[in-house]
Amino acid sequence: MSRVVIIVALVGACADPTRSYTLELPFEPMLLEYRSGSGAWHTPHGSFASPPDASTTFEVAVDDDYELVVVCPGTLGVVTFELFATREETPSVSELDCGAIPVANISGEMQQAGQVFTRLSDAIGSTAPWSYSGATTDGPNDLVAIDATASRIAVRHDQVVTDSFAEPAIDLATEGDATASWLPTFTDPPAETDLATISTYLITKNSTVAQLATHALELPATQVVDGDLQRLQIEDPMAGQVLEIDNYFEHTPQRVFTLPTPIEGVTFDPTSASWSSSGPFTRAYFVVGDLAGYQEAYASADWLEGHGPTSLAFDGDAPGLDPAWSVTMPTERLLELDNVVSSYGPDYVVYATTALDPTLESTTARRRSRAQLRR
């Protein structure tokens, strides 16, 4: 992995010393620009390192809240990412899905009908036994297997996968454990909650995303480890929004939830999203995507608190932005506001509400995993 090191010098009237931040990128940026406030755009000093595992230092000086624009090759196409952050915040591009991902083939046999999930694929078998094949990434991987009735599950953590990997046979009768259905309790829920669809996901420490059931499912403690999380996805048909609740297994999973109200006053246009809800919000995303790539604007909690915006838009002013990188025929357009991070002693739950553009028929926005981005 090549490493890009960005040094951000905070300068201005205050007496704060220069601060240095390290940012690791496994790709060469197609574009990297930044500016303080509404000032001039600047290209960081430096260049991408080669060969791999070398590091390059970029120097960035900001004296105000800033924007950072990064364009990079994604797994399927071009990704354009714009960060809005305060001058006190470390620039982060952890939101980016960029760079060439080493892909490995994985195959094996499962003794029960059901599903097998890897980081890049999932397979379904209706007979028993059955064979599966799919793709994952080189390096540490987690495999999730669940039977057709979602009653038994097995998770294989930290498997080191390279090239073509032959998975040992999966037998849920011997290595799996029983799940249990449960009913979450919602305090002060919206009236339409009874009509909502609840799905359960397991998102493992190495970012395998497995949709396990279309109801609330309790997972056995013997199959999860620190770093895994359970996501309840509640689709609100009246508001046209999706609420996601993340429970982390290293804490005690919550069973009672106070649902945030739907995002109010949401409107979309090709390059922006607006809302009228007052927050507070801990993060905001505006994403436009198609099958070849996506554009994403991301605002941090401190920036949202300091600026109090009611819209988020792509800034097309950065020099060097190529119109060919824009998403012109989107299959998804969404606004995500992370409404609450609730603390319960040592335990916490993250709530995120996503509003979907109703003019787009694709359901990819509902299934596109943002798990890795919110870890």
Image (cartoon, helix red, strand yellow):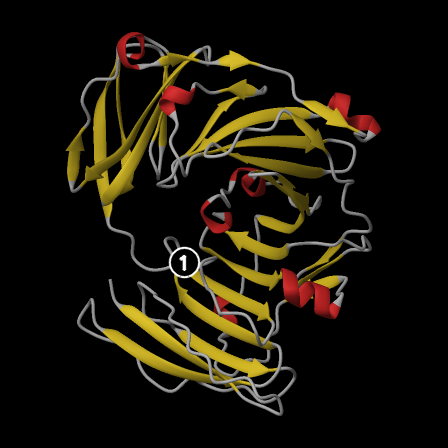
Who is closer to the viewer here, 286 or 179? 179
Q: Position of residue 82 (x, y in %)?
A: 54, 68
Mark 1 residue crowding within 10 angstroms, few (<14) / some (14–19) / many (20+): some
Location of residue 206 (image quadrant): top left
For the question of whether residue 48 can be seen, the reply is no
> Does 246 sit left or right of 126 as displayed?
right
Does any portion of residue 100 appear in the rendered image? yes
Q: Residue at x 45, y 83 (%)?
A: 60
Residue pointed to by mark 1: 77
Q: Residue at x 32, y 10 (%)?
A: 112
Q: Is residue 5 above or below residue 352?
A: below
Establish if 350 lies above or below 128.
below
Q: Which of the 4 image quadrants contains residue 272?
A: bottom right
- Up-down: is 311 above or below 7? above
In the image, taking residue 183 as reference, residue 93 lies left or right, namely left
Is residue 139 shown left or right of residue 213? Answer: left
Q: How many marks?
A: 1
Q: Residue sitting at 55 percent across and 28 percent down? A: 253
Which residue: 53% across, 19% down? 217
In this rendered view, identify the residue nearer to me: 203 or 240: 203
* Amino acid type, residue under disc 1 in the picture: Gly
Quarter in which the N terminus is drawn: bottom left
Position of residue 201 in the picture relative to residue 140 (left or right) = right
x and y, in percent, of residue 177 in the image = 37, 13
Q: In x, y percent, where is residue 69?
A: 51, 73
